[in-house]
Amino acid sequence: MTSLWHRFVEVGDSLRRSGILQALAHEYVRTHALSSDNPAGPGILFFEKISQQLCDHVRAFSGNGMQRVLAVGMSQSAFTGNTVWQLLRSGASDVFSWDHSLHPAREIAARFERWASVDEAVASPLVAENLVGSNPDWISMLRQIVEVASFTDASVLITGESGTGKELVARLIHSLDAHRHKRDLVILDCTTIVQELSGSEFFGHERGAFTGAVAVREGAFALANGGTLFLDEVGELPLLLQAELLRAVQERTYKRVGSNVWQQTDFRLVCATNRDLLLEEAQGALSARSLLSHRFLELQATTIARTSGGYPAPGPALSASAAVR
């Protein structure tokens, strides 16, 4: 691991500081004391309380989030209200308390190892040649995409207006998923699915299941097995069909139309919608039977007209916003 800088902000107990550094060294985390207010590279800020000065330090040391800064409180009592969000908005990559775990130094080592892998992927041609941008919000979003794709198997919901690059993000998630990149990415545009044939589109059908079914047909759930299923504009599907899909996605089983045999499937689900889900949820319009009520990691897509350097971006971009639904 690359050597990290460290700084203690208003932590006066020298014995405690020494103990923390020894614990980090035991986990092979090499650090050096920050000797200036213009650090280069990733580092750790230790603090007793959250203040405006601390937020200013985080903002300056992280370059508004471009560099990895881990903010570590000496105790859980350092966190009150929404103070954690103040540090995250200032550019901290993560925030936690030293006493929240039996092995905090080990957790710090694991975080920086994972972040190094994420940042290496962000700088790789696979990412850099497909999604272009250089401002802090953009880099933060790319990191989120890489973390979700490479370190989780979670379903992903991409929200945003049409034309903001949601399919590009879905393709990138599939490519970065080491467990699935050798199997297919199956894409369905839900705005083109005819309701009468939707069961066949998703679940497939048996020969003779209906007029014109002259042979067995595999549906999207079978074709995506071992890979990724991307449902574009999933919010346009009828609610009854969404309820069927929700059950099949959660149980990982389905039946072909005209069959009584349950089939098994295992795929990563990536969905996209241009609907304002927060507004629909507030208005009570988001049904519990909707596929959009499934537990997703949510990424929000918006159009960024220009990169931080002032040049037009050659493609769509994303804003840094992620949440669990």
Image (spheres, grey):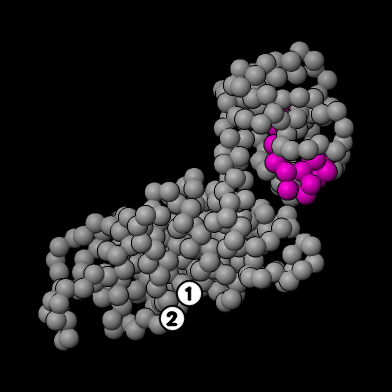
Q: Residue at x 63, y 70 (%)?
A: 316
Q: Residue at x 45, y 51 (%)?
A: 177
65 in magenta = yes
Residue 197 in the image: x percent, y percent?
28, 81
Q: Are marks 1 and 2 in contact (CB under 8 Å)?
A: yes
Q: Amino acid at mark 1?
A: Glu
Residue at figure coordinates x 27%, y 70% from the top left: 219
Asked if residue 183 lies left or right of residue 288, the reply is left
Magenta stretch bounds: 57-74
* Horizontal arrangement in the rendering, residue 204 relative to residue 261 (left or right): right
Q: Is residue 279 visible?
A: no
> Which amino acid does the dot numbered 2 rest on?
Thr
Q: Which mark, by number, is residue 189?
A: none
Quadrant for the N terminus in the image: top right
Mark 1: few, some, or many residues within 10 Å (few <14, many ≥20)? many
What residue would you read off at disc 2? 191
Label 2: few (<14), some (14–19) or many (≥20) C-alpha neighbours in 10 Å:
few
Q: Which residue is mark 1?
A: 233
Helix, strand or loop at disc 1? loop
Q: At which x and y percent is residue 103?
A: 57, 23
Q: To which quarter of the image does residue 116 belong?
A: top right
Relative to the observer, which residue lies in front, 293 or 9?
A: 9
Number of marks in the rendered image: 2
Horizontal side of residue 246 vs 129, given as left or right: left
Pinpoint residue 102: horizontal percent, then vertical percent: 56, 22
